[in-house]
Image (tube, grey):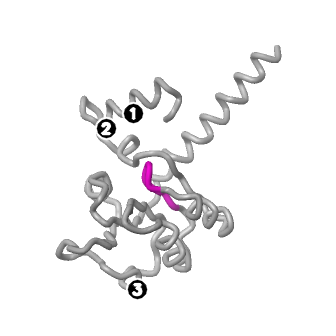
Amino acid sequence: MYRTMNRYIRNKSRLEHMNEQESFWDNGSFVVVTDKTKPAMRWTAQELKRREKKVYVLDLSDRPDEGSITEVSGLPAEIDCAIIGVTRRDPADVIEQIKNMGIKKFWIHWRTDTARARKLCQQAEVQCITGRCPMMYLAPGGLNMHSMHRAVAKIFNKY
């Protein structure tokens, strides 16, 4: 009985976490913050646009792409979510700047989150997903590196 209950609690927790990650993409507008060190940020923006979401790219690199927004002040007021994939600065610096715009949902790309960023999200009482690559959830079906990553993550209960 104890083992069954323990397994149920673990599985329920995993499902709630999974639902949070998958439902993140149900929102209508996103800012993708990049410094071009994570290729998945470009793919994330492309996939969200393909899904007809409103997408703004905040390019904090040394060589921003034409049409990108390069300053937080250039972002429109009403954005639902932020996806942050920066390695040249602490993502907490970005969160500090854009949380004041009213964004309450953040996704910090796999292996780019920091203790300071997690603490800031907790203190600000905002949703913060960390430790996951957005493309595991956004990639279209079929065989590709993202679907393989997704399959491996599921096998090891990391999805």
For label 2, the residue is 146
Q: Where is residue 64 in the image (x, y as percent from the top left)?
A: 22, 74
At 24% across and 34% down in the image, what residue appears?
144
For label 3, the residue is 73
- In the image: residue 135, left or right of residue 22: left
SS type, badge 2: helix
The residue positioned farthest toward the right in the image shown: 1
Check the image and report above or below for 6 versus 46.
above
Q: What residue type is labelled 3?
A: Ser
Q: Which amino acid does label 1 sit on?
A: Arg
| Label of residue 150 in the image | 1
Q: In which quarter of the image is residue 19?
A: top right
Label 1 vs 3, first from the N-terminus: 3
Q: What residue type is labelled 2?
A: His
| Label of residue 62 in the image | none
Q: How far apart are marks 1 and 3 (CA)?
A: 35 Å
Contact, mark 2 vs mark 3 (Cβ under 8 Å): no
Contact, mark 1 vs mark 2 (Cβ under 8 Å): yes
In the rendered image, the quadrant that contains the N terminus is top right
The magenta stretch spans residue 16? no
